Image: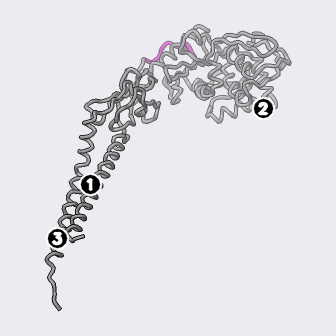
Amino acid sequence: MTRSALVKLAQIRAARAALLSIAVMALMFSGTSATATAANVEYTVSDRTVRFKSPQMPTGTKANSAAVMDADSGRMLWALRPHQRRLIASTTKIMTALVAISRTRPNELLTATAYPAGPGESLLGLKAGERMTANDLLTGLMLASGNDAADTLAARTASSRAAFVRAMNRRARSLGLRDTLFGNPVGLDLPETYSTASDLAKLTQHALTEPRFASIVSKSKATLRSGTRTRRIRNRNRLVGLYSYVDGVKTGRTLAAGYVLVGAASREDARVISVVTGEPSETARDNDTLKLLRFGRAFFRPVEPLSRDRGALRLPVALQDIAAVAYPQRDVRFAVRSGDRLRVTAIAPDQLKGPLAAGTRVGTATVLREGKRVDEVPLRLRRPVPSPPTLAVIAHQVGNALPYVAILGLFGLVGFMVIRRRRRLRTHRPEYVG
């Protein structure tokens, strides 16, 4: 093969290599672009501070002491002589229930004691030796205020009734209830049995975090099927059942203590706790409790930062002059206080690349209240995203490849010039005669 033919062959091979490199680079760039299209970024969907007018302070209560607490934060919203020590009657049973729950299984059978009831005591009607589940005893304790149920729980979950009372007082100290002392699990008047409106609110705040307790006290009535006979009982707290937002907690009454009621009410995910002690009548007790619960609930407003009917985010679609709307999979609704900062963020691609079917998950929205996560919801497409037009795809890939084509063309030109120069040098190389 002649020298000129070899040079031409080298040029052809260099051109082929350059074209192959261009094709590979174009494909690589196209793949890189698709990955970049799906890159996740954080969007701020909304950011605002909620403001509304605070409620007017309650007036005219007939209680000796009273309190309203935000159950979530423990903040006292309003109080009347909250640290005054008072007889608390059967609201003692809140602590009785807490200690008994920690020592029993729901379906554990306990044998009833022979309780020596005095005149006028509230009873479940247990017979000595009768066997009843722990949960039925707890229900009879909190709804019917059964003193015989309290005695059975104390005697059967501790070495003695005195030991059970000591456990009640240990729990009180662990909860920081400095003005509370228990002398029995029933709530009968004793000099060494007392508490305050503030301490009763704190005790109830803790008790409502116990699912078994919260489930029982929110019932307006119950049927107890264990024991020697079926018992149908009603909650002595008449507000539960009459008002949908009232979900507890416990009544109490003795001649010395007067009428006592620890109440609880919810608004969305917010809950408030009320306490009234020393009320002159059942009517006054209930009216004042409703007044305090309504006052406490007015500190909160329901908000709905995300709704299935409202698009949360508009996302551009690659290679198309359209945007796709992402919707939350479900509604997010909760209660806020005045001054709460609400922020909704979303993690989603910077662009979508079709085709995508309706219902495809394209991101996640997070709702924050005062910087703390409240909820997290998937974001989905309500409508499909079509494939991009073929011409747009080709133009996009060509456009992406052009910088690489230019660079490789430059390298090819340099290579061609080098080969040509070498050819010239070989053609005009001088010959020496020896």
Q: Disc 1 residue type?
A: Leu
Q: Earlier in the sequence, mark 2 or mark 1?
A: 1
Residue 316 figure quarter: top left
Q: Is residue 19 found left or right of 424 in the rendered image?
A: right
Q: Are marks 3 and 1 in contact (CB under 8 Å)?
A: no
Q: Residue at x 28, y 35 (%)?
A: 390
Reply above or below: 204 against 416.
Answer: above
Residue that mark 1 sits on: 19
Q: Residue furthest front?
A: 1
Residue that mark 2 sits on: 163
Residue 42 placed where, x, y %?
37, 38
Marks 2/3: CA distance?
A: 106 Å
Residue that mark 3 sits on: 421
Residue 323 placed where, x, y %?
30, 30
Q: Earlier in the sequence, mark 3 or mark 1?
A: 1
Residue 423 placed where, x, y %?
18, 71
Residue 94 falls inside the magenta stretch: no
Q: Residue at x 24, y 45 (%)?
A: 398
Residue extent of the magenta highlight:
56-65
Q: Earlier in the sequence, mark 2 or mark 3?
A: 2
Q: Residue at x 25, y 36 (%)?
A: 391
Circle on res. 54:
none
Q: Nearer the viewer, residue 392 or 422?
A: 422
Q: Disc 3 residue type?
A: Arg
Q: Disc 2 residue type?
A: Ala
